[in-house]
Image: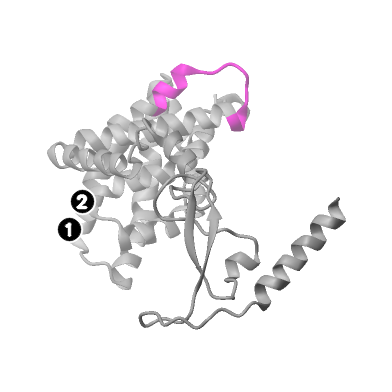
Amino acid sequence: MRCLAVALALTGTHGFMSHKLPATPMRGAATQLTMRLGNGGGGTRRGGFTGRLGAGWKKGIVPRNPGGGGGMMGGGPPRDVSRRAADDEGEEPPAPKAAEAAGLWAAYEKALEKDPLLIKGLTSMTGFAIGDILAQQFIEKKGKYNLNRTIKMASFGLLVHGTTSHWFYGKLDGKIPGTDAGAVASKVFIDQVLWNPIFGVMFFGYMGLWERQGVDGTIKRIKGDLMTQVTGSWTVWPVAHAINFKFIPTEQRVLYINTIQIFYNCFLSIIGNRDGKKKGRK
């Protein structure tokens, strides 16, 4: 039966293609032969047939009708588009994270302009607290977390580092304005040769007083740890401050410093909380 059907189909096609149609004049168009194709909706649709098959037909792709029902020739959006539209229906777009970040930054700048001393102190407090937590939990790993030590480091950032940095960098930018190479180099030199040891004295002096080591114990601590801190600073801050003095506005220097100093504070926290007996201090 299959062979008979194939033979009949071939015979019919041959007869159809070999049949010559009478030339019939049409308005501005060549002779056309219309054929009826069934659509998915059960009806029929007329389409032009000129003896050539388009690229889509050769590849077995049936073109869709822009309008109408959803059959082989029917219109409507493709299934994947319809499915995506259905899936997205009722969903809210994701929160604009960039806008939120811009809003937080704008709020920080507004607060910084209103009360720079307090905001810079809070910024330093956060940086020193995070640095100590990282040092305890991921570097030293002594087991039990020491909350008092974190409070000590955070209070130094709030009371000493933030306030003195606000004063020092404001004065430094006022005396040496500009961002040219000479100004940047001068600021880095002053920061690392003059301010760096002064900062070390303040840091270890605060640690000694917090731990009630007395004047003599605090002086011994400064003598024992100051050079370690100063030389350690030289491995990080010359490059960091070159970027700082070149690109960062004066009012945002403390925020930039504390961003870098989160990791440097791990080093400060370790040497600032070393056992004095191990170093020979009494």
**Numbered badge on residue 228:** none
What residue is at 32 percent from the left and 37 percent from the top? 161
Under mark 1, the amino acid is: Gly
Disc 2 crowd rating (10 Å Cα; few below 14, some 14-19, many 20+) is some
Q: Is residue 100 above or below residue 39?
A: above
**Numbered badge on residue 170:** 2
| Secondary structure mainly formed by the magenta segment | helix
Q: Percent from the top left, x then y, of residue 9?
A: 75, 61
- Residue 252 belongs to the span the image colors magenta: no
Q: Is residue 263 above or below residue 282?
A: below
Q: Which residue is mark 1?
A: 174
Q: Is residue 158 above or below residue 108?
A: above
Q: Is residue 281 left or right of residue 253?
A: right
Range shown magenta = 138-153
Q: Quadrant of the C terminus?
A: top right
Q: Is residue 110 left or right of residue 228?
A: left
Q: Percent from the top left, x then y, of residue 170?
A: 20, 51
Q: Percent from the top left, x then y, of residue 122?
A: 28, 32
Under mark 2, the amino acid is: Gly
